[in-house]
Amino acid sequence: MAPFVSPDVLVLAGGGVVGEAWMTGVLAGIEDGAGVEMAGVEAFVGTSAGAIVSARLAAGKRLRRPPDPADTRDAGEVRHDGPVRTVARWGWAATAPLAPVATAIAAPGGALARAALLARVPSGGRSHARLQSEVAGWGVRFDGRLRICCVDKRSGRRVVFGAPGAPRASVAEAVAASCAIPWAFAPVRIDGREYVDGGVWSVTNLDAAPARRGAEVLCLDPTASLRTPLRHAFRVGIEVEVQILRRRGARVRRVGPDAAAAEAMGTDFMASAPAPAALAAGYRQGRALTQTPLVSSG
């Protein structure tokens, strides 16, 4: 059997409350199956719900596991924090209408099209103060490893906080901005500019990964389980991003929910009820992944 190859870079996509649970389960399963610490990878790239998971890893916080059926203690560890649950549920619904625009990564008019759509987004709305306060309490800072993807509301361009040359921001501000869903939440103002959900640009933002030649990149994409026109729109952009990384010499492996996980997750990624089952299915899938090398087949 080929040895398990731990990734150098983790890219965690958007995907709602159910996707957040599945990604958490997969990573916890990999940790337990391979005896590795996912918090120790070289770099993290997070978008929307993936930004929350990435920030938790960068903060060195332990990932949730499914509860032991024989354990009668409070299973609070598997509950979704209120801000996380709310952000993911609203995010999936509100970001979806912009997906076709987000696939035009290389199109000259792509940013202008986004800006035109985002110009209609009101500056008011639900606040991310609770989420921002929660993330701030984790004590995580940008140290060169963590990158959080957002979109500048005025220009329509992607901004990757934590990357070289990016505007200054706290991790808490960046995570809140990456989850600032148009029409559902107020944009997050950072140094005089307003930012919205990174999923407006791409569900994965794979091409933002700081992947050196020969690096192993693992992308967890909860939306891969969807069989809808929306997923087709996502797939076009993701394929472009994968090729960008491969031209840099990185090896890329994308993992989506397997059949059992997809069934557990369902199709309503905003619903919180399937989250415990998604966490458990992701954990089982993560452990299974440690039996095969985490490398690209191409």
Image (cartoon, rainbow, N blue to C red):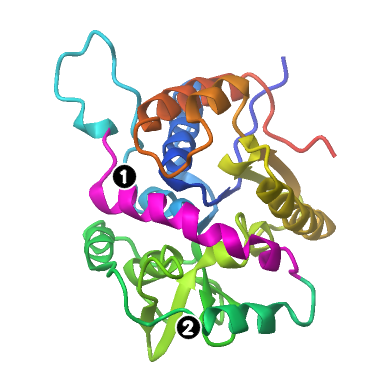
- Say which residue label 1 marks: 61
Q: Nearer the viewer, residue 271 or 143?
A: 271
Magenta residues, start to end: 79-105
98 magenta-colored: yes
x and y, in percent, of residue 60 in the image: 34, 47
Residue 92 visible in the current orientation? yes
- The image quadrant that residue 295 belongs to is top right
x and y, in percent, of residue 65 in the image: 35, 27
Instruction: Give the SS element for disc 2.
Output: loop
Q: Quadrant of the N terminus?
A: top right
- In the rendered structure, which amino acid carries the disc numbered 2? Pro
The extreme left residue here reads 73
Q: CA distance from mark 1 to mark 2?
A: 26 Å
Question: Quick check: 220 left or right of 296?
Answer: left
Cβ atoms at labels 1 and 2 below 8 Å apart: no
Q: Is residue 97 above or below residue 190?
A: above
Q: Badge 2: how crowded within 10 Å, few (<14), some, or many (20+)?
A: few
- In the rendered structure, which amino acid carries the disc numbered 1? Lys
The extreme top residue here reads 70
Instruction: Give the SS element for disc 1.
Output: loop
x and y, in percent, of residue 104 in the image: 75, 68
Question: Quick check: 205 left or right of 33?
Answer: right
Q: Is residue 18 above or below residue 82?
A: above
Residue name at image x 82 percent, y 55 percent: 243
Q: Badge 1: how crowded within 10 Å, few (<14), some, or many (20+)?
A: few
Q: Is residue 206 above or below residue 280?
A: below
Question: Quick check: 251 left or right of 137?
Answer: right
- Say which residue label 2 marks: 167
